[in-house]
Image: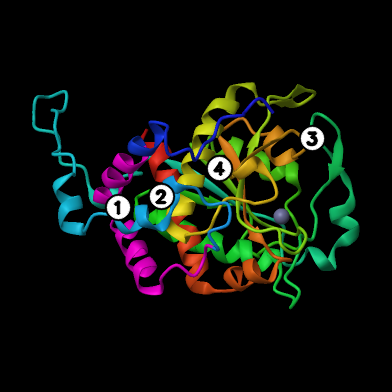
């Protein structure tokens, strides 16, 4: 809970660095350009403007370079391999070659039929917590579990396009769960370079926007997040920035003080992780305006693209 800085303050150097990063990433990521094409075509249906700060306004997004100018910013394949031969130019399709990303679609569509199993307690270091929960839903009944699976599959495709090895913790193919301790263990055992757990919130009406949840520094029982706090923060900040750009959504107006970043020590999936990991609550399913976005396949594609761009940015350093 030590974080106080304005992550989206336009006066910080972060803005120019992030914009430069966007150009570099876009040059190497055809999918990003596709994502922006969708964004331009659909327009800004996502943001109400409430809570959005100057640095992340759509005008920034619309200044995104064309593919031609982005190409000119691409690295030129400098350097030589150890045997003296010119190193091959970086492959546009292989920016994440050798990287492992674990995507954790929150909850499970079948959890509703397995309440006894998911209610059993598991150890998360600081305390005991339910194995898993059913998650929330829109007022019309579109469940968080359906949402997270759909975004996970879109995100997997975007990351695989960049050459990443991607594993989902569940793909709607399990009776329930996995439990939150197993979700963490999957990322650990894969020695993942980044893990993102996908969610949508179930807050009050009028509460809008997304937020990224970062692991607090926890050292208790089986939990020791101290080595992952800093890289997870970096991962989370990059995802938050790219999520704003890709979706036009504003950071949460009800937690995170407008930064879109929240630190928590009560989530087993974070407490038990030994690799960089964040959660993202993509919006509030119980708010009608946010729900209208969350049920849109076009919006979910933008959400996945934004998360993917943040991960790519983090993994490329
Ligand atoms: Zn959730």
* Chain-order first, disc 3 or disc 2: 3
Query: Closer to the camera: disc 4 or disc 1?
Result: 1
Q: Secondary structure at mark 4?
A: strand
Query: Closer to the camera: disc 4 or disc 2?
Result: 2
* Position of 203 relative to 291 (above/below): above
Q: CA distance from mark 3 to mark 1?
A: 37 Å
Please give the name of the residue rendered at 28% of the width and 58% of the height, measured from the top-left corner: 30
Residue 186 visible at all: no
User: Magenta span covers which residues?
Assistant: 18-47
Residue ranking furthest to the bottom: 140
Q: Are marks 1 and 2 in contact (CB under 8 Å)?
A: yes
> Disc 2 marks which residue?
309
Q: Secondary structure at mark 2?
A: helix
> Disc 3 marks which residue?
124
Q: CA distance from mark 4 to mark 1?
A: 20 Å
Q: Give the camera-side residue of 114 and 155.
A: 155
Q: At which x and y percent is residue 154?
A: 48, 63
* Position of 204 relative to 293 (above/below): above
Q: CA distance from mark 4 to mark 2?
A: 14 Å
Q: Residues within 10 Å of mark 3 (few under 14, many from 20)?
A: many
Q: At which x and y percent is residue 89?
A: 16, 41
> Disc 4 marks which residue?
195
Q: CA distance from mark 1 to mark 2?
A: 8 Å
Relative placement, left or right, of 58 versus 299 is left
């Amino acid at each position: 809970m030590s974080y106080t800085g304005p992550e989206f303050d336009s006066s910080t150097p972060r803005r120019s660095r992030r914009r430069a990063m966007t150009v570099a990433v876009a040059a190497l990521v055809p999918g990003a350009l596709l994502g922006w094409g969708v964004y331009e075509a659909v327009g800004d249906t996502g943001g109400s403007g409430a809570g959005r700060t100057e640095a992340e306004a759509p005008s920034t997004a619309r200044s995104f370079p064309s593919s031609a100018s982005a190409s000119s910013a691409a690295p030129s394949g400098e350097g030589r391999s150890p045997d003296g031969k010119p190193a091959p130019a970086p492959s546009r399709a292989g920016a994440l070659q050798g990287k492992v990303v674990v995507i954790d679609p929150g909850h499970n569509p079948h959890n509703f039929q397995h309440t006894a199993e998911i209610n059993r307690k598991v150890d998360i270091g600081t305390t005991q917590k339910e194995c898993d929960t059913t998650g929330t839903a829109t007022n019309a009944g579109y469940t968080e579990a359906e949402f997270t699976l759909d975004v996970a599959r879109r995100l997997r495709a975007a990351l695989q396009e960049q050459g990443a090895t991607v594993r989902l913790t569940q793909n709607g193919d399990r009776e329930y769960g996995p439990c939150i301790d197993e979700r963490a263990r999957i990322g650990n055992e894969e020695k993942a370079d980044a893990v993102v757990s996908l969610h949508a919130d179930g807050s009050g009406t009028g509460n809008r926007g997304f937020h990224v949840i970062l692991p607090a520094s926890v050292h208790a029982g089986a939990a020791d997040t101290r080595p992952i706090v800093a890289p997870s923060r970096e991962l989370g900040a990059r995802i938050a920035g790219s999520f704003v750009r890709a979706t036009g959504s504003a950071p949460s107006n009800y937690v995170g003080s407008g930064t879109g970043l929240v630190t928590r020590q009560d989530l087993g999936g974070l407490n038990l992780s030994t690799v960089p990991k964040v959660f993202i609550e993509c919006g509030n399913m119980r708010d009608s305006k946010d729900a209208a976005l969350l049920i849109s396949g076009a919006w979910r594609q933008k959400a996945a693209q934004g998360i993917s761009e943040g991960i790519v940015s983090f993994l490329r350093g």
